[in-house]
Each structure stands twice: as structure tokens, then as C-alpha cells.
Image (cartoon, rainbow, N blue to C red):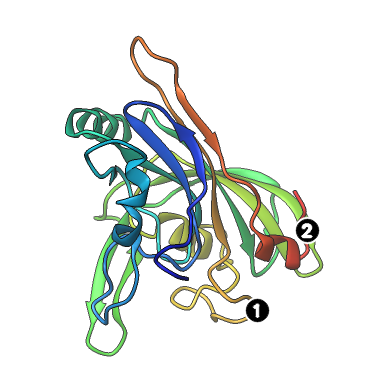
Amino acid sequence: MSGSQAIPILYEDAEALVIDKPAGLPIDRPRKGGLCLEDHLDTLKLGFQRQPSPVHRLDTDTSGCLLLARNPKAHKRFARSFEDRLVIKTYLAILDGVPTDGSGTIALALSKISSEAKGWRMIAAKKGKPSVTHWERLTILDERSVVRFRPETGRTHQLRIHALAGLKIPLLGDPVYGSGEGAPRTMLHAESLTVPRAGKPDIVATAPLPDDFRKAGYSG
């Protein structure tokens, strides 16, 4: 991915952008160096003096809707909306297996652990931070399945560990919580984002289905 590659814009107004973040583009600069979202922020000014700034996080492998604020006041308001669970988000995921039920809610508290051998990861732990995800199975692809997740909370790796610990099935291609095989990346896509605003129209964006989901057999 080149630093000059255009990032699709899904929504734009005076205080917000929603971009379709490509899979493989990290939000923060990796320790080992390489491109990150920061390399695109000048291009994403789109005539404004300030660079926009990301309001929330997506894992490097995750594609799809990412909200950027165009000024500090908007950033503060949007961040509060995330904290207050007012933002509606949906994700598409390909699971490396088929859940028994067709839908449900996963409520598992999450905690961060680390070891010298494996580095850090999230685990389900009673004393962790409360985390809630609603899900529905959309289709079955042979021995795999496609689900739509709607998280109420936004914990680190929430959907990845909820799939593993809640559904007992990891995301396809997940190198940390699964085998890392069967796909070129963790198959998770931030499908849609709705941010309510007082006195203004809601921010509403939907990211198109990525090519690698289609190659895996899901056409939406």
C-alpha cells in the first residue's frame, strides 16, 4: 500500500469524515516502521487547515468504517457518544466454523494479559471490563459462516475474543485467537456506522463489501 493511495470517503461534512479504511493499514505507526493512517491525513484535509483525527480504533487487519473528526470540539463530542454507547456499529465477520444458534448476545468481560512468549492479548475474565456484542448468522459457507456483529461496547479485540470465547469459533485468518490460516487477514469488516448528533442529521455511513470477502464466497 503506497502512501499516496487514495482512501475512499464514505461520509463528509464540516465536522466529520468517515473513511473506508483498507485492511492492512494501521492507525498508529508500527514499532518496526511502515505506513499508517497518519501518512494519509494531509490528503484527507480536503481543503481544511487541520488534519482530521480518528475518534475510535480499528485493528490493522480490519477494513471499513472509521470516523475522523475535523476539529477538536467535534472529536470530544464524538468520543463522548462512543463512551455513552450511542454509536451504532455493525461488523461483518467470517467465522472458521458454524455456530449452533442463529443469533444471540455475548456478554463477557474482557481483560488484557501479557507474557514474554506470546506478547499481549485479551481474554474473557470475570474481573475484566464489561463487554456486550449482539450477533446474527447470515449464511453458511461450507464449514464456515458469515455473521453480523453489533457491539454495544468497544473494547480492544472485543469481536475477536467474543467469537472465540462466546461462540467457541475464531474469526477466519485470525493469527492471535485462531490458526491464522484460511485467509490473508483476520476476516473482519466494519460494515456500518451511525453517530447521532443533537440538532444535526446523524452521521450515517456504510462501507462496501471487500473483495477478499467475495473471494471467500460471500457476496452480501
* 145 sits to left or right of 170: right
How would you rate the neighbour count of disc 2 (Cα within 10 Å): few for under 14, some for 14-19, many for 20 or more? some
Locate residue 101, reporting x and y percent: 69, 50
* 28 sits to left or right of 91: left
Residue located beneath label 2 in the image: 140
Snapshot quadrant of residue 111: bottom left
Can residue 124 be seen at all in this image of the molecule?
no
Residue nearer the viewer, 122 or 8? 8
Q: Secondary structure at mark 1?
A: loop
Locate residue 132, reporting x and y percent: 42, 44
Q: Secondary structure at mark 2?
A: strand
**Does 152 appear above or below 158?**
above
Nearer the observer: mark 2 or 1; the answer is 1
Residue nearer the viewer, 143 or 25? 25
**Does 16 appear above or below 179?**
above
Residue located beneath label 1 in the image: 182
Question: Which tag, 2 or 1, sits closer to the chain's start?
Answer: 2
Tags 2 and 1 touching, CB below 8 Å? no
Residue nearer the viewer, 39 or 156? 39
